[in-house]
C-alpha cells in the first residue's frame, strides 16, 4: 500500500464506519461538532486518557468522530474475548500504527497481514526469543543493569533524586541494542538522551498527532512538523545503516538478532530478508524493544515507591530467592514470582502499549450483537479492559499485585489481561521484556529503598505509548544485609513452551 509523500498517511486511510451496518446502536459522546466531531473538552496530547473518559461515560463499546472519520473503541471483556478469535479476526494496521509505516515500513510490527515479509521475518526471528537465546542475553542484561546501578549510586552519593523514565529508557535502549545488535549507544555516559531516542520520540509523537488533524489539511497544518519528522526518520535510517555496516565489516556477531536478519535463510523456503527490510526490522526492534519496557519499569517503580508494604514483600522475596549471590543466574529471575506480579499489576493499570486494533476477516457478528462487514475494525482500549468491573471488581483502580497470584489468574476468564496483544501478531518480545524487567526490579529492590516525592501526582504522558511524566525518586542504600540463600525447588515454570513466542498461556 502506497503512502502519501507529505504526511506519511497511508492512502485510503479511513475511519471504521463503513464496516458497521448498525453503527447507530453504538453510543457516542453527546456534544458533536458538525465538522470536527467529538473534540469538545478533548486533550489532543492525551488521546488514550480521553478515550478512557469517554469509555467510562459511554460503556464497553463506543465511537468517536474526528474530522469526518468515525472510530469504534471497545473494552468490555466479552467483546475483547470475541475479538481474540483468530478464525474471524486479525490484527488491523490502522490509526497510530499505520502512521508509523514511513518509519518502520514492512517491519514485523507495522507489516500488513498480507505482506509476505511478515511470515518470513517472524519465522527467521522467532528463534531469537527462544529460551536458549534468552539465556544468552542474560549476562548482557546484567551488564547493562550494572551501568544503571553505577549511575544511581553516583546520584545517591550526590544527594540527587533519580529521573526514573529517563534512566529506564537508557537501560532498555542499551539492553536491546547490545543483546540484539551488539551496539553500544553509550546512554549512561551522556547527560542528555541519545539523539536516536530524541528522533524516535519525535516520530512517535508525530504519528500520534497525525490522528488529531483533519486528513486533507494535514499537509498544511503539519508542514513544519512533517519536515522535522522526515529528518527524524532519516536520522534513524542513518543510525541503523551504521550499525549494519559495522556488523558487515566485522564479519558477524555471536548469532544475535542482527546476525539472524543478515544471514539466516528461512528454514523451509530458503528466502532471506532484503537489505531494505533489515533496515526496517532493526528500527522496529530498537523502538518496540525499549520504549514500552521502559514505561513498564517506570510505572512499576512508581507503584513500589507508593506502596512500601508491597516493596517490602517483593524485597523479602528477592532476598529469599537470590540470597547474596552477586549476580543472579538466568533461572533465578523467573522465580521472583511476587516481583513479576508487581510488574503484571503495573501493566494492568498502565499497559504501556495501550491498545491494538482488530479487523473482521469475513462478515461476522461481534459477540452476537454487533454486525461487522469484512474489513471492519475496532480499537481495543487496554487500560479500560484492565479496569472492567465485571472482571476486576469495583476496586479495579486499586493497585494490588495479589490479583496475579496463580489462583486468582486461573479464576479469571481468558483474554482479560492483554498487555502484549493477541494471536499471531502478539508481541514477539514478551519473554524478553518480562525477563529484563523482572531482573532489573529485583536488582533495584535488593540495592535501594525507594522514597517517593510526597507532592508527586501521577501524570501519564502519551506518544502512542504511555509513560509516567516527570517521575523522580530519592534512593537510600539498604542497610540490612541480605540473609543466606535458601534453595527453592524448581517447578519448571521458568522454561518456555515449544513455540518460543506463543508458547506461554495468555
Ligand atoms: Mn512488543 C507487538 C506490547 C516489549 C517487539 N508488543 C506488540 C503488541 C503489543 C506489544 C500490544 C501487539 C500490537 C498490535 O497488535 O498491533 N511489547 C509490548 C509491551 C512490551 C513489549 C507492553 C513491554 C512491556 N516488544 C517488546 C520487546 C520487543 C518487542 C522487548 C523486542 C525485543 N512487539 C515487538 C514486535 C511486535 C510487537 C516486533 C510485532 C510482532 C508481530 O506483529 O509479529
Image (cartoon, rainbow, N blue to C red):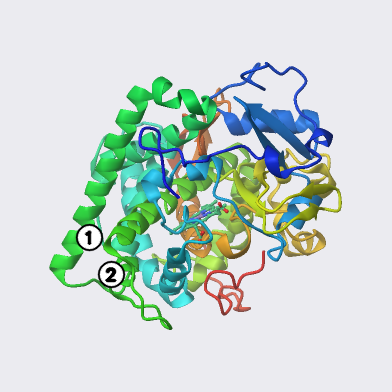
Q: Residue at x 78, y 37 (%)?
A: 23
Across and down, in percent, residue 196 comes to 29, 42
Circle nearer the N terminus (2, 1):
1
- Answer whether residue 499 is visible to the viewer in this image: yes
State the SS at label 2: helix
Dot 1 falls on a residue whose secondary structure is helix
Q: In x, y percent, where is residue 458?
A: 58, 29
Label 2 CB less than 8 angstroms from ligand 1: no
> Seen in the image, is 385 located left or right of residue 429?
right
Instruction: Read off the residue under disc 1.
Output: 244
In the drawing, what numbered circle is on residue 262?
2
Residue at figure coordinates x 37%, y 45% from the top left: 103
Pointers 2 and 1 in contact (CB under 8 A)? yes
Give the Cα separation between the discs numbered 2 and 1: 9 Å
Q: Which mark is residue 307?
A: none
Q: Nearer the viewer, residue 164 or 55?
A: 55
At 31% across and 33% down in the image, what residue appears? 158
Q: Position of residue 427 (x, y in %)?
A: 53, 59
Whole-percent x, y for residue 128 in the image: 41, 71
Amino acid at each position: 500500500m502506497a503512502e502519501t509523500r507529505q504526511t506519511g498517511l497511508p492512502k485510503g486511510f479511513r475511519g471504521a464506519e463503513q464496516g458497521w451496518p448498525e453503527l447507530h446502536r453504538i453510543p457516542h459522546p453527546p456534544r458533536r461538532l458538525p465538522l470536527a466531531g467529538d473534540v469538545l473538552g478533548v486533550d489532543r496530547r492525551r488521546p488514550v486518557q480521553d478515550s478512557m473518559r469517554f469509555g467510562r461515560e459511554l460503556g464497553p463499546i463506543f465511537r468517536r468522530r474526528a474530522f469526518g472519520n468515525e472510530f469504534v473503541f471497545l473494552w468490555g471483556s466479552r467483546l475483547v474475548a470475541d475479538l481474540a478469535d483468530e478464525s474471524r479476526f486479525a490484527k488491523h494496521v490502522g490509526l497510530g500504527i499505520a502512521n508509523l509505516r514511513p518509519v518502520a515500513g514492512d517491519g514485523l510490527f507495522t507489516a500488513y497481514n498480507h505482506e509476505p515479509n511478515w511470515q518470513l521475518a517472524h519465522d527467521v526471528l522467532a528463534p531469537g526469543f527462544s529460551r536458549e537465546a534468552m539465556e544468552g542475553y542474560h549476562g548482557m542484561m546484567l551488564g547493562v543493569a550494572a551501568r544503571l546501578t553505577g549511575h544511581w549510586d553516583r546520584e545517591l552519593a550526590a544527594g540527587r533524586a533519580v529521573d526514573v523514565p529517563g534512566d529506564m529508557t537508557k537501560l532498555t535502549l542499551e539492553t536491546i541494542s547490545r543483546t540484539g545488535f551488539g551496539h553500544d549507544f553509550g546512554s549512561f555516559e551522556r547527560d542528555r538522551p541519545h539523539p536516536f531516542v530524541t528522533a524516535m520520540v519525535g516520530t512517535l509523537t508525530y504519528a500520534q498527532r497525525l490522528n488529531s488533524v483533519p486528513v486533507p489539511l494535514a499537509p498544511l497544518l503539519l508542514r513544519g512538523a512533517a519536515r522535522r519528522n522526515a529528518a527524524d526518520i532519516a536520522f534513524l535510517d542513518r543510525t541503523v545503516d551504521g550499525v549494519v555496516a559495522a556488523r558487515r565489516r566485522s564479519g558477524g556477531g555471536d548469532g544475535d538478532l542482527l546476525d539472524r536478519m543478515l544471514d539466516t535463510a528461512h528454514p523451509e523456503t530458503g528466502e532471506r530478508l532484503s537489505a531494505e527490510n533489515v533496515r526496517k526490522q532493526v528500527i522496529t526492534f530498537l523502538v518496540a524493544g525499549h520504549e514500552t519496557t521502559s514505561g513498564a519499569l517506570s510505572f512499576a517503580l512508581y507503584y513500589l515507591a507508593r506502596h512500601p508494604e508491597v516493596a517490602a514483600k517483593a524485597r523479602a522475596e528477592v532476598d529469599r530467592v537470590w540470597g547474596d549471590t552477586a549476580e543472579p543466574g538466568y533461572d533465578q529471575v523467573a522465580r521472583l514470582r511476587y516481583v513479576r506480579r508487581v510488574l503484571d499489576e503495573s501493566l494492568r493499570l498502565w499497559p504501556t502499549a495501550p491498545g491494538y486494533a482488530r479487523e473482521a476477516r469475513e462478515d461476522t457478528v461481534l459477540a452476537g450483537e454487533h454486525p461487522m462487514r469484512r474489513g471492519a475494525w475496532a480499537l481495543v482500549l487496554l487500560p479500560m479492559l484492565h479496569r472492567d468491573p465485571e472482571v476486576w471488581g469495583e476496586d479495579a483502580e486499586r493497585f494490588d499485585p495479589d490479583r496475579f497470584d496463580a489462583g486468582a489468574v486461573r479464576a479469571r476468564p481468558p483474554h482479560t489481561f492483554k498487555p502484549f496483544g493477541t494471536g499471531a501478531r502478539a508481541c514477539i518480545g514478551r519473554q524478553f521484556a518480562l525477563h529484563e524487567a523482572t531482573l532489573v526490579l529485583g536488582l533495584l529492590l535488593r540495592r535501594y529503598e525507594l522514597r517517593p516525592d510526597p507532592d508527586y501526582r501521577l501524570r501519564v504522558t502519551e506518544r502512542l505509548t504511555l509513560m509516567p511524566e516527570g517521575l523522580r525518586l530519592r534512593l537510600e542504600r539498604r542497610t540490612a544485609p541480605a540473609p543466606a540463600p535458601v534453595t527453592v525447588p524448581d517447578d519448571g515454570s521458568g522454561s518456555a513452551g515449544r513455540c518460543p513466542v506463543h508458547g506461554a498461556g495468555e
